Amino acid sequence: MVGQGDEEFANEWYEKIVVRKECTLGGFIEGLSEQLLSIDIHERIKGLARILLVIKKFDKNFLTEGEVGLLLEFFIAKINDFALEKSCAIEGTHYVLFNNENIPKNCEREIFQGIFKDADVQSWKVSDRSYLFDIFSFLIQTEERINNLKILESDIVLAFVTASNGEKDPRLLMKVFKIFLQIVKHFSLGHFVEDMFDVVACYYPVEYTPPENDTINITREMLSTACEKCLLSTKSFISYCHTLIQDRLTESDEDNPIEGKLYDCLFLKKAIEAFGIIGSAPYIKDYFTAFRSIILNPTLKQCQHSIPKEIKEVIQFILEELLKEGERGRKLIQTIIDEMLENVEPFIVQAEMGLCARTLDFVYSAYEVLKDEEVKLKAFYWIGILLEGKTLQSKENHKEIIEESLPFLIKFLSLSNVFGEEIDTIYKQLECLEGKFNDIIFEHECGIEAFLLKNNSEKYYKKFLHDGINSIVGKEYNLNHNFFKLCHEISRKYPSFLVGELLKQDTNFLKNSYVFNIFTSALVDENSWNLMEKFIFVSIDVNGFDKIISEALIYLSKNSDSMILEKFINMLIKNCSRLGRHQDICHSNVVAEVGLHLNTSQHNEIVSLCIKSLEEKDISGLSSQFSNTEECLQNLLYIVFPLLVQSEILTIENIKTIASVSNKKFEKIIIYCSYISHSKDIDSIQIFSNEDLEDLETRIYLIKVLSIKNHPDYLKLIHSLFEDINNGKIKETDHEILVNLFNFDGLYNDPILCKYSCSILWRQRYFCKFVEIFMEHYLFTVTFSLYFALLQPMLSFATTISIPMNVELLYLLPVIVDALLQVKDIKTETDHHAIISLLNGLNQLLPMAPLEEVEQKTINNIIMKLLEFIQDTSQPFITLQSLIVLETLTKVSPIERISIFYTSVINALSVASKCQKRAIRLASAKIRNQWEILL
């Protein structure tokens, strides 16, 4: 510790040496000789510290080269004198080196030998070790210094190995790794190759978790990257590195769990990239054996039907690299594949072992790279055995095995361009299974035929189309069914045939909603649209935009060409008089999704045409079917309104025209807000009159739009909202409107679907600011119900934010607790609903809020209120929800903070366990077990 007297001493000597020049540095040190040579170790340490204090006062260029050299000799000599004491000898050496310009030339050897040759660096404290690694780094910092040390090459390497061996401090490890790379780059490792490798290999894989309130800002990722870079820094490490990886891959799951082995696979890829495939070739066969043992390990639960992506990635990388090596690489590949096919066969054909799909994926991963016909045919042979079910012990498993294996049939086919007799064999095998497993077999037959059609090798598409048409209504195929892929490929190659088959069907069939996806899946180009348009329109005209049709159209919007989407919108506009009678919200969702996937010019063209018609009140230009009536204008607006909301080209005059045509209040609110969102004019908010802003729905929607955009007025509007809550202008009956403040999903609420202008991180900002304003006004309210009503939607919204909102959530916890404590009697359905909402909110909040920062009193109040609800089983829903919250609290709370309630909890659970409701009895027993295990 430096005292005030020492500081005064340093200032006095600085004046004498630098300012008044009454004494030299040498004279100053000589004057301290009695203290420096004292038999009292503490006096010697104090003298050295005083010298360093004085030196720290000097400018960088004050000392001459000779004086700097003498100081270095002086401090280095003292290092060994005070090796085990708390002296500043190492700090002094570090300071002189790093804070003086006139460093003696060619001093590197003397410094190295004086400090590191026989030093036990790890015996020093952390701060001194840090200085020493800085000094070591300094010595090998420039080419000139490195050349001066070349004569001591083996000493340098050995000294580093000794100095760094066993280092644990993460800050110093980063320095160790940096020095390591410099030594490997500039010095021959000689006999110390293995020793150098071991210096860093002991840290692989890095297992480091920064402590709470970490200030050193070193992460596990930083240490891992640096460590791995060292391990791969020279080809001298090839054998050691591969041995390390192989040992880890073949360790037991206890010593190296599957997560560790998958990490090792990613490191293996880096190793092969660094060392080259030729240098790594001797180890490749053993790696594939290791991969096989991991893949075929029954304890691997995370990937039942595929191999882990880490293993797939490294397998394919190895094979790709071997292919680049010509004949030599192909020979090794052949050996690997032969062994693979031989060793995996039992795990595929004996499918009841549960490893069939994963093993097939192992083979497929190799086939993806090699495209080897031998591998494909072998896979088809195995799949054929599985389809026949000859190797099954129990025929009850046949269906499951078929479902696991058939997807691989299409996978292997999809990478092939040669289709021989094996296709006929496959179809015969599938045909034999149609009677027993018709649905599964038919879907895969469609998938295979769709692929063959795509490759001009079709065989039975007419039969499968006929079978699908006959069964689609009864089977209700989902959107991803392979039958629709088959329809798509038939439409692409034989469109007239598909239309002819559809025209053979009766009207009821064509109008069925489940048939609609045949029409949309057939849309491949303009010609197919022209052929299918009449079918699409008739179905929509009859069914409207029901759930099935809406899902099909939304799927189409995400997977189709924008030209087809444009034609679809134009069809709706052309027929809006007829379609307008449906007036359902599903239509608007569909149009919004389609609008999202139109290109900008198409979107603008459609909007411009519709606006022109609305302004002129003449829509005959859109279709000869139209008459210029008010009803026709309303129908047109109904069809295109979602596109108008998305549009960025509308002027304020256009917006007012739309509002004047609309006869719906919500449309005026939304179109005005969309204009504000898209407008660059900060005063665009003035499109709303003061009277408009008295309406609560308008205010809610405007706040959301402005917050998404980060408009400067949105905070003022939120304040105004809470002021009206507190002064009673906003009533308790308005709570259903108020909770929409946090509804950002679905039509006209989702900013993406509306194409609203969004600022970065708008969710985080909105939540943070809202909670801040909420708490500010909550403290002064006398009516709490609307505040409480907002809690659950606020918490639900918090779960959609990727960044934890811990501080804000802590603010809300006392509000929920206050709300619960105010519950005395539960008289009305509204009371019941409010309590359930509060309990749901509390259950959401507890896992997210940092409970270590919550006051004990708050936790006490939560538990006491929960126990009160639990014991009152006359309200079973509240009792059950309270039990759920208590279970959550038990899981997330530190034991020492809840253990004092053990007796009370057990007593309350005993009461609840006598309830007639079975769910309550089960929940009580489960929580009682938790508490007894914990405590």
Image (cartoon, rainbow, N blue to C red):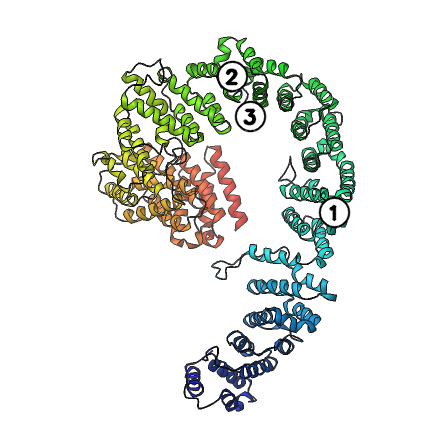
In the figure, 337 relative to 663: above or below? below
Q: Earlier along the polypeptide chain: callout 1 or callout 3?
A: 1
| Residue 718 in view, yes or no | yes
Q: Position of residue 472 (x, y in %)?
A: 55, 16
Tell me the SS state at disc 1.
Answer: helix
Q: CA distance from mark 2 to mark 3?
A: 14 Å
SS at mark 3 in the image: loop
Side of 92 where 661 appears, left or right: left
Q: Quadrant of residue 640?
A: top left
The label on residue 515 is: 2
* CB under 8 Å between discs 1 and 3: no
Viewer-side residue, 192 vs 551: 192
Task: Residue under label 1, please give it.
Answer: 284
* Residue, disc 3: 480
In the image as oriented, which residue stretches furthest toward the left? 691
Q: Position of residue 726 (x, y in %)?
A: 24, 43
Q: Secondary structure at mark 2?
A: helix
Give the amino acid type for the residue marked by disc 3 in the picture: Asn
Mark 2 or 1, nearer chain start: 1
Q: Amino acid at mark 2?
A: Val
Which residue lies at the image location 47% right of the left edge and 23% below the top edge? 564
Distance CA(mark 2)–CA(mark 1) = 53 Å
Q: Nearer the viewer, mark 2 or mark 1?
A: 1
Report the side of 785 relative to 434 (left or right): left
Looking at the image, tell me whether mark 2 or mark 3 is earlier in sequence order: 3
Task: Report x, y in % for residue 879.
Answer: 42, 38
